[in-house]
Amino acid sequence: MNSLAKIVKYSFYDILRSWWVLLYGLFFLAITSTLLYFSGDFTKSLVSLLNVVLLLVPLISTVFGTMYFYNSREFTELLLAQPIKRSHIFLGQYLGLTISLMLSFCLGIGLAFVVYAGTLEQSSHLFMLMLCGSLLTAIFTIVAFLVSVCFEDKIKGFGIAILIWLCAAVIYDGLFLAFLVVFNDYPLEKASVGITLFNPIDLSRILILLRLETAALLGYTGAVFEKFFGTMQGTLISFTALVLWIILPLILFIRKVSHKDF
Amino acid sequence: MEMLTNTYSHFIQHKHTHNFSVGVVAALLSKTVCMLSILLIVTYQLTYAQTLEVRKTGPIQSIKKAIQLAQPHDTISIREGIYLESEIIIDKPLTIIGRNNPVIDGQLTGEIITIQADSVVLEGVTLQNVKTSAIKDYAAVRISRSKHCTIRNNHIKNAFFGIYLEKADSCRVQNNRIHSQAKMESTSGNGIHVWYCNTMLIEGNQVSGHRDGIYFEFVSGSKISGNTSTLNLRYGLHFMFSNGNEYRKNHFIKNGSGVAVMYAKEIVMEENTFENNWGAAAYGILLKDITDSRIEKNRFVQNTVGIHAEGTNRTLIQHNEFSQNGWALRMMGSCEDLRFENNNFISNTFEVATSNNYTSSNTFTGNYWSSYTGYDLDKDGVGDVAHKPVKLFTYLMEDVPTSMVLIRSLFIDLLELAEKVAPVLTPTNVQDTQPSIHLNHW
Amino acid sequence: MIEIKNIHKSFGKVEVLKGIDIRMEKGKIYAFLGPNGSGKTTLIKSILGLVQPDKGDILVGGENIRNNWHYKNQIGYMPQIARFPENLTMTELFRMTKDIRKSVSNEEEYIRYFHLEDSRKKALKNLSGGMKQKVNAIQALMFNPDILIFDEPSAGLDPVSHIKLKDLILQEKSRGKTILLTTHILSEVEELADEVIFLLEGKIYFQGSVPELLYSQDETRLDRAIARITQKKTLTKYKNAGM
């Protein structure tokens, strides 16, 4: 096992020991079972769950990401004095946190679904939700790490990370809407596809909604979206966009970190 | 029915007075025993009319020849086998019955059967391969300017038009299966096409894969019941300028654009199911210029729009179920005096959308709304707070359709919340002041 | 063993190290002294690769440490404050570092030496400050490295443990290790240091043995000598500023 895998392993152990990641998983277990049992309608519960996931996964990943980075600073320094490649230490910590968050998220939802005994078709929808949730976890954790490494001050870093989350979750859509209202006289469907691609939360929302029945109601705009996201090529582009949201901040993070003084 | 009976009674009295009992019974009991008269006619026909048999190995091997040989009111029985014939013209009252499922194959040459006489019965045959044309509406069966014809229990495959009725009167189209595999609207025809007809009965047919499943234009006093129309390219049912018709217990499922009813009055639609009509311009039902009608006990399930109404007036919409539609209702301008009473609105993405210049005298009373967030303190089953089914986002989308991309986003949720606390944009006159707390039953 | 050549480092506009040259040999203890902010910690962190110098080279065992991490196998580091993942136990922490370093270790010996046998299964966050310091010391020593760096090792230790640690340091010296030490406890310096490196405002103000330092300042007591250096420097600063 190389040093990266070791760091992942130990960060992972470290995080699993703390109660909050467990609580995170339990929360999703509780909310998913509640939705599945009390609504009775799978699609409807999945749509409600989607709202919860799109709100909480990025937020919690941002919060945990910054907190973990700042709190594990001492552990980081301990590791820095050890014979390990610098990038491996940080990459390892990032992967350790992301994987544990993803795992508790997926297990929470998955377990509720298994107990509920859903069908195969339903599980494919659920898988999509898990995949998007996991990607959002990875994205917002790395963004939080990147912000944390840029700001020595914990409070400042935390504030800016939350601001970024707020931008992605709310402000972006507000501006998006303003744009649509202002330029209402122009055909904006294709532009909308583009704008959606740039925001991972919007992109995940559309990817999942299009796979549920509710997708077809999107009218003409929906038809254009369906035409893009419904194809293999569109799906590929979407996931590439999401993965780029992980890779680009990750590259910046690693570059930043390899020149940083501790 | 009354007319039918009278005609037959008349016929019997004049031409067969030797059968004294028939005349007496018909004369004495008139309407109430109409069924009996018909039975007696059948008895008469079996006794006096001739039956010709078309058989692959018999003396008469072609249907056309049998028709040529037959006298009016004769029966032609077609035996099993494939008959490669088209342009068959029935110009005298005949009963044509298929035995052991014979197939008449038009080989894509033109129309298969054209009926130009009254009282023709066509039953139990399979008609297939009708030519597609841009100039002429070729059909598997055409009834032209005739009365009292019956087309039943036939199977029509791969036809341009299935059954085409023009200027016909009092005909019955029953229990036929009409299936095609149309690919494009421009090169496909309708399953059952009715034009300038009266008193038709369209019952128990299954239509799929055509342009419109059932098409009515200038048809009145007719009943359409128990039909299933699915997977048609455009509309499951499409009618225009057709007044006073009744539609009961039909199923319209997965049609390209759902059902469109236009420019008609005194329509009754009951217990129909409109299901799974999804698409950019699809509706459960599109009501355009419909007046003085009644829409009752129908189910609208999983359609892009449950009911889309334009210029619809004085219509009662009650006891319908709207569930899991994109929009349960869309009301565009000039809808007046629509009464929505005791319907159930369950799990629709949007409940009601209105055009933004909406001012109306439409009313909502006693409906159940699954999204109702009010309360019922006195426990009388009626919510104490009015339900406002038009949400800010629905309102926004009428103006800026592209804003649909923001559906279920946090931003929109926050906007909705703000609007709920302090309504600014959403119309206040669309509200159900007596929302039902429980599902309505009927 | 360690060669430091003309090291410069600034944090923003603040120049912390302004050209430092030191050569440190095997079997000697080097004590780094200097007021707060004189650059001691930055220098040590530069050797450890935690801080990257703007200019100059550091050679450890003849190897340049720039963009290199293998040389850290030769170093044991005891930081000023205990730094470990809080949820791990001592056993797990040692298992982890052993897993990472893959060298022979003798932590058991040290655990017994510091009487930490009963704390093996406790989460590290539940240990007292002094105990954490001991764990820290064991972390530095357990792989028997050629170079040992102690940053304020006595902080938080009780007198007995303090003596025990000093004994360990001397023992390591006798094994021919290069030992770097920062401390504010001057008795420790007098007891242990072969050479004192006095840093002032990012430069080496004095380098030599304790007696040499005393002689240079014409004092008999180390604390007086140090106070004098610091004062003198402050005075010159005022003079330069035209006061």
Image: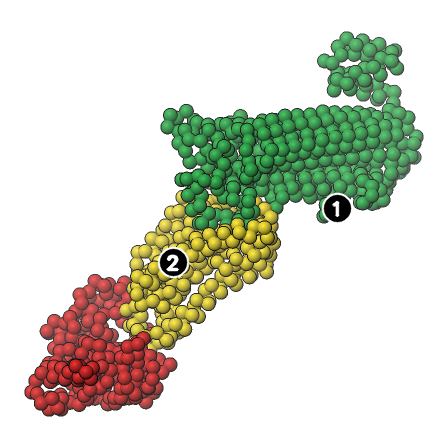
Chain colours: A yellow, B green, C red
Picture residue at 33% right of the left edge, 86% below the top: C57
According to the picture, the residue beneath numbered tag 2 turns out to be A163
Looking at this rendering, what residue extends furthest in the front direction? C242
Q: Which residue is more in the foreground, A42 or B405? A: B405
Q: What chain does mark 2 sit on?
A: A
Q: What chain does mark 1 sit on?
A: B
Q: Secondary structure at mark 1?
A: helix
Picture residue at 46% right of the left edge, 27% below the top: B434
Q: Position of residue A246 (x, y in %)?
A: 45, 64
| Kind of residue indicated by mark 2 | Leu
Picture residue at 41% right of the left edge, 45% below the top: A33
| Kind of residue indicated by mark 1 | Ser
Q: Position of residue C81 (x, y in %)?
A: 22, 71
Could you give the CA–CA distance between mark 1 and mark 2, rounded to whole angstroms? 54 Å
Q: Which residue is more in the foreground, C165 or B429? A: B429
Give residue C186's quadrant in the image. bottom left
Of the residues tagged 1 and 2, which is closer to the observer?
2
Count of labels in the image: 2
Q: Is residue A104 visible?
A: no
As drawn, B38 above or below B167: above
Disc ID at residue B186: 1
Disc ID at residue C2: none
- Could you tell me if the residues under marks 1 and 2 are in contact, i.e. CB atoms within 8 Å? no
As drawn, B23 above or below B96: above
Q: Position of residue A58 (x, y in %)?
A: 41, 56
Q: Is residue A198 visible?
A: yes
The image quadrant where one finds the N terminus of chain B is top right
